[in-house]
Image (tube, rainbow, N blue to C red):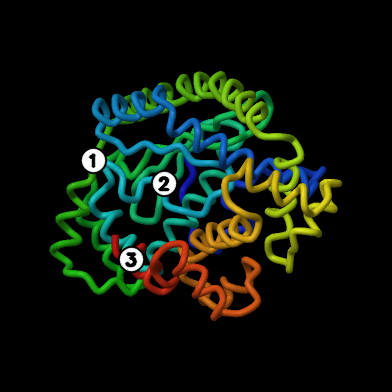
Amino acid sequence: MRTIFAKSESPAKGAPGAFRSDSFNPATVTENSLNNRTLVEALANSRIYRDYERAFSDMTGLPMALQPVETWQLPHHGKRNENAFCAMISKKSRACAACLQVQERLCERAAEGAETVVCPVGLSDSAVPVRMSDRLVGYLQIGQVFRKAPTEEQFVKVLELCKKWELDMNPESLRKAFFSGKVISQKEHDSAIKLLSIFAQHLAMLSNQVFIQQENAEPPVISKARAYIHDHQTEEISLSQVAKAVNMSSYYFCKTFKKVIGINFTDYVARVRIEKSKNLLLNPNLRISEIAFEVGFQSLTHFNRVFKKILGQSPTEYRSQLLAH
């Protein structure tokens, strides 16, 4: 396992932790992304994962998360044992962006094995890949921990970073949160990574069972349709267009899609776009109007209306609430 110190350069283009390959196939990547998210969600909701996460957090005092490969969010935000300092600075967009860059870099480098990065304030985050056969589907992550006791000199540098991030917070509150961070020895850290690696192997076996269940539960034509929708969600997309892509009549496709998915085609496309926008809203460098067009809406007004209908609040309210917790 290597330890990498996070730098301040901008993150590489592409989804955080996305698997790179010379034989890149957009259609395959899109379908795999959809399957990965569904699979990891099923694993995270399984009893074995929930029991392990609870036991691991009780034993180590560390937050633990299971993340899909394609993600753009902070894995430990709002979780039990979240670092108090991390919770404070995540409320501000610039600091949040810096943390997201660290997470992206960590996942990019953990595709082949366990990796640890040290963030700009000196906290360590680690990730272990979870695979289904030879396919990377996600990561087990722990972090927000010091491997050496923080020092006053270190805190002075942290205050400089906070100024750079435009964090208007009481220095004493920052100090209290910073020095309350959990400190573990190198041996304890190595043992935690070993436990994660063992559990990742168990999840790999479980993932095959979950995948087979999912494949049996959903007709291949609907899986293909959903992959097509995700692939073309940024474009103007119609029911007849998707029906044609999966070689079905519009009428039969409409009935089958609603029966299997539980909602009609139009609502599903809207929810796919809104789900994508929720991740993009975490990026403080993107304007809401940019996000609306990026996910496939033809007007900001339509985006705002659909977003509020689905989530009960406007994109602006959602972003403010997200960064305030």
Quarter holding the C terminus is: bottom left
Res. 9 in view:
no
Residue 182's disc number: 1
Residue 240's disc number: none
The answer to the question of whether label 3 and label 2 lie on touching residues, with beta carbons closer than 8 A, is no
Q: Is residue 2 left or right of residue 99?
A: right
- Provide residue 92's location: percent of width, then percent of height: 34, 68
Question: Which of the two discs, 3 and 2, sits closer to the camera?
Answer: 3
Look at mark 3 in the image and give the residue it sits on. Answer: 321
Look at mark 2 in the image and give the residue it sits on. Answer: 75
User: Which amino acid type is shown beneath numbered disc 3?
Assistant: Gln
Alpha-carbon span between mark 3 and mark 2: 17 Å
Local secondary structure at mark 3: helix
User: Which amino acid type is shown beneath numbered disc 1?
Assistant: Lys
Question: Which of the two discs, 1 and 3, sits closer to the camera?
Answer: 3
Disc 1 residue crowd, few under 14, some 14–19, many 20+, Cα 10 Å: many
- Provide residue 221's location: percent of width, then percent of height: 76, 40
The answer to whether 314 is drawn above or below residue 242 in the figure is below
